[in-house]
Image (spheres, rainbow, N blue to C red):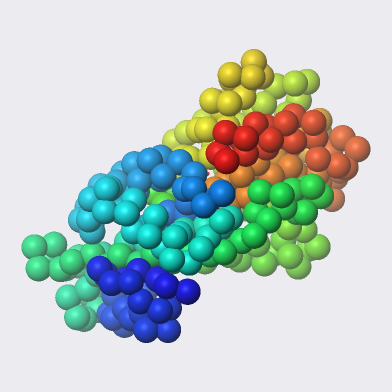
């Protein structure tokens, strides 16, 4: 596959980044994942705006303009012939050639920009979404700025591994008795026709899919309540689901071994997935 690294399109085997890059040494980097459906980028604008915000919150320089980013996304989708899949983008603070906790001088240090595509045929028509996901709950021990999309993904990776070890698919995280979000998605449950999800704050990522799905739910006259909720409430729900750029709307059928409803994807989650994909395609 052809990838993009610091201004160049290269075969993936030829792309190089310094070992002193702060993205590598300190996870001093932010990222975005944008889905591709029918060869088209889904909500590029939303991801570009969130990237700008992440960079600003960390005093990181933008590597290029939004228009240039769009151009790179489009070119990679085209040359790699992606019909359904993902574009991964990462910006790190770069490096001045040594390891130091102090940020390098932004006047003399350029951020690193890396993009690559992931080909995922059948992403929209996924068997996993037809089956629904089994979730376990784990403690949320991540840092307090989860609204910034940094590459500090060790704990979310461990969460997925804990889920796998328990025979489940994913984990929802709990802080102070309330669900924050999934390891790589936002979390929702449905009770008596009402969709409940945690309100936006520094505690969760402001999902681009979340925003689109809540708008679509509102347009479809569904009831929405943004409030804190417990894992016990979710276990007693009629249905549950998650949203993310990589899995769209994913029905949840089991939480900590407790089946939701009849243990198959809920009607509302399935409908939201359809509505979302219809608009995105
Ligand atoms: N993850 N919450 C977390 C912690 C996430 O990592 C993600 C996305 C989301 C959903 O955000 P969005 O709808 O903008 O994709 C919520 C991406 C897909 C990933 O890490 O691969």
**Measuring 69% from the left and 35% from the top, which residue is drawn there?**
274
**Measuring 62% from the left and 35% from the top, which residue is drawn there?**
278
Between 255 and 62, the residue placed more toward the observer is: 62
Taking the image as shown, residue 225 lies to the left or right of residue 12, namely right
Between 199 and 106, the residue placed more toward the observer is: 106
Q: How far across and down, in percent of the image, does residue 84 sit?
A: 58, 55
Between 141 and 237, the residue placed more toward the observer is: 237
Taking the image as shown, residue 35 lies to the left or right of residue 125, namely left
| Residue 192 visible from this viewpoint | yes
The quadrant in which residue 141 appears is bottom right
Query: 46 above or below 94?
Result: above
**Measuring 25% from the left and 68% from the top, which residue is drawn there?**
7
Q: How far across and down, in percent of the image, does residue 224 sit?
A: 62, 22
Residue, far right: 262
Q: How far across and down, in percent of the image, does residue 18 sit?
A: 28, 81
The quadrant in which residue 61 appears is bottom left
Question: Which quadrant is home to the C terminus?
Answer: top right
Taking the image as shown, residue 81 lies to the left or right of residue 96, namely right
């Amino acid at each position: 596959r052809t990838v993009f690294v610091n201004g160049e399109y290269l075969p993936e085997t030829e792309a190089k980044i310094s070992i002193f890059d702060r993205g590598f040494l300190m996870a001093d980097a932010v990222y975005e994942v944008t889905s591709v459906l029918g060869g088209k980028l889904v909500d590029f604008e939303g991801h570009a705006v969130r990237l700008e915000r992440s960079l600003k919150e960390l005093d990181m320089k933008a590597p290029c303009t939004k228009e240039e980013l769009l151009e790179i996304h489009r070119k990679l989708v085209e040359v790699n012939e992606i019909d359904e899949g993902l574009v991964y983008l990462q910006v790190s603070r770069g490096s001045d050639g040594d390891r130091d906790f102090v940020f390098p001088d932004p006047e003399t240090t350029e951020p690193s920009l890396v993009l690559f595509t992931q080909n995922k045929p059948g992403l929209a028509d996924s068997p996993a979404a037809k089956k629904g996901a089994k979730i376990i709950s784990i403690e949320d021990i991540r840092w307090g700025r989860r609204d910034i999309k940094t590459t500090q993904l060790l704990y979310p990776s461990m969460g997925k591994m804990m889920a796998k070890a328990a025979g489940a698919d994913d984990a929802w995280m709990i802080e102070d008795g309330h669900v924050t979000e999934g390891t790589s998605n936002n979390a929702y449950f449905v009770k008596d026709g009402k969709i409940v999800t945690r309100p936006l704050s520094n505690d969760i990522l402001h999902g681009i899919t979340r925003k689109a799905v809540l708008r679509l739910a509102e347009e479809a006259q569904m009831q929405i309540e943004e409030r804190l909720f417990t894992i016990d409430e979710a276990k007693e729900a009629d249905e549950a689901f998650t949203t993310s750029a990589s899995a769209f709307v994913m029905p949840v059928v089991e939480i900590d071994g407790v089946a939701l409803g009849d243990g198959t994807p809920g009607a509302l989650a399935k409908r939201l997935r359809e509505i979302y994909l219809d608009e995105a395609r």
